[in-house]
Amino acid sequence: MSSDSVDSESKVSGNQANIPARIRRELDIDDGDTLRWRIEDEGEIRVQVVQQRDGTFGAFEGYDGDQDTTVTTDHDAWGVDG
């Protein structure tokens, strides 16, 4: 591999390596995403980014209603003692 074909590089620290910012931006890699690693022929590594855009709060936009809420009353209404 010549230095002309290198997009970015990072060092391994312990058992971890950082993903360079340029690569994260270009591939839209964010917290919670998964990287799937596969060793190809001749020792090359292929990495697939699995983006985690769904989940418990993936589509949560917050409360946009006009009803006032009282934390203590609403909390107690669910049967949870404070």
Image (cartoon, helix red, strand yellow):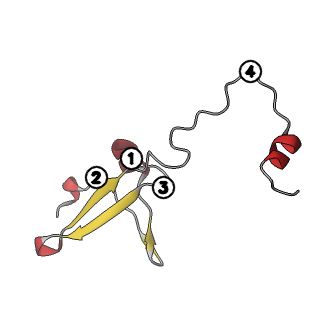
Amino acid identity at mark 3: Gly
Residue for badge 1 = 22
- Residue under pointer 3: 32
Q: Are discs 1 and 2 less than 8 Å apart at CB?
A: yes
Point out residue 44 in the picture as x, y percentages from the top left corner: 18, 69
Tell whether 31 sits left or right of 20.
right
Residue 66, label in figure: 4
Q: Measuring from the top left, give residue 75's x and y in whole percent.
A: 81, 47
The disc at residue 7 is 2
Closer to the N terminus: mark 2 or mark 4?
A: 2
Mark sitting earlier along the chain (1/3): 1
In the image, 37: left or right of 76? left
Query: Is label 3 or label 4 in front?
Result: 4
Q: Closer to us: mark 2 or mark 4?
A: 4
Which dot, 2 or 3, sits closer to the camera? Answer: 3
Amino acid type at mark 1: Arg
Q: Residue at x 54, y 49 (%)?
A: 56
| First in residue order: circle 4 vs circle 1 | 1
Mark 4, residues whose alpha carbon is within 10 Å: few (<14), some, or many (≥20)?
few
How far, Cα to Cα, is label 4 from label 1? Answer: 42 Å
Q: Position of residue 80 (x, y in %)?
A: 81, 56
